[in-house]
Image (cartoon, rainbow, N blue to C red):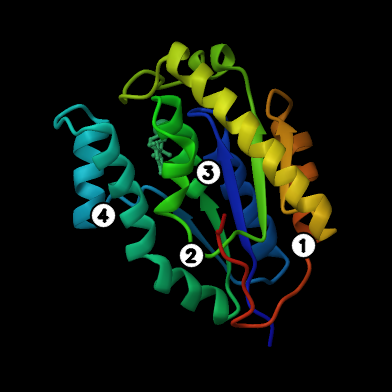
Amino acid sequence: MLRGKFILFEGLDRSGKSTQARKLAEALKERGSRVEQRHYPERSTQVGSAINSYLTKTKSLNDQAIHLLFSANRWELQQALVDLLDSGVTVVVDRYVYSGVAFSSAKGLDREWCWQSDFGLVRPDLTIFLDISPEEASSRGGYGEEIYEKVSFQSKVKAEFALIAAKEEIRSSEAGKASWVSLNAQTSLETLHAQILSHVDAVPDRLPGDYDFMQK
Ligand code: TMP
Ligand code: MG
C-alpha cells in the first residue's frame, strides 16, 4: 500500500488557496482517492485559540512568541498528519511552514531564526504557491478583518515568499522532482484547477514512512 500525498497550498491572504484546495480535494475524491483537508493555523486547539486571539486583535503578543505558537501548532498536529498519510490518505493542506517563515520574516525577524522551529517537520511532497498581487487580493471579499490583511504588509510577505520560492525551486531541480510550483492565481478558477491537477498527478508515489523533512 502507498502512503497518501502531502499537497500544500501557500500564498497571500485571499489568494484563493481555500477554493483551490477544496476543488482539488473534490476532484481527487471523485477519482476514488481518500482525501482530507487541513488548515494551519488549526484554531481549535489551545495553542490555536491563542493564535486566533492574536489574529483577531483581541490579544497582543511579541513577534517571536506568535511565531513560535504557529510552529507549535504544526508540531502538536504533526503525528496525526503523518498517521493520516501513512494510512493512505492524501492530505491537502492550506498553509504550513512557508507561511510561518514568510509572515514572521516580513516583520523583520531573522530569516534563519524563523526556519529553526520548523526543522524536523515533514516536508510537503508538493507546494503550490498561488501568486497574486497584494492589490488584487485586497479587493476580494472579507479582506482586512485580520491583523495581517494590509496591502503594505502583504507586499513584504510576497517578497519573502519570492525568496523562499527561489530556494525551493533550486531544491526541486537538484532533486529532479518538482516539489514547489508557483502559479499565477489571477486567472480563471478552472484554468488554475486544471494546472494544479496536472502538477499533483506528477507527484511520485511513496511508501508509508518514507518522508523528507524540513532542514537547513
Ligand atoms: P489563515 O488566513 O490561513 O487562517 O491564516 C491566518 C493568518 O496567519 C494569515 O495572515 C497567515 C498567518 N500565518 C502566520 O503568520 N504564520 C503561520 O505559520 C501560519 C500558518 C499563518
Ligand atoms: Mg486569512
Q: Residue 89 location in percent, x, y?
A: 58, 73
Q: Nearer the viewer, mark 2 or mark 3?
A: 2
Residue 5 disc label:
none
Residue type at the position of mark 3: Tyr
Query: Is 115 located above or below residue 159 in the figure?
Result: below
Instruction: State the separation of the CA atoms marked 4 and 2.
Output: 23 Å
Residue type at the position of mark 4: Ser
Residue at mark 2: 120
Query: Is 185 located above or below residue 210 in the figure?
Result: above
Label 1 SS: loop
Report which quarter residue 181 is drawn in.
top right
- Does any portion of residue 66 appear in the rendered image? yes
Label 4 SS: loop
Instruction: State the separation of the CA atoms marked 4 and 1.
Output: 31 Å
Label 3 SS: helix
Asked if marks 3 and 4 touch (Cβ < 8 Å), the reply is no
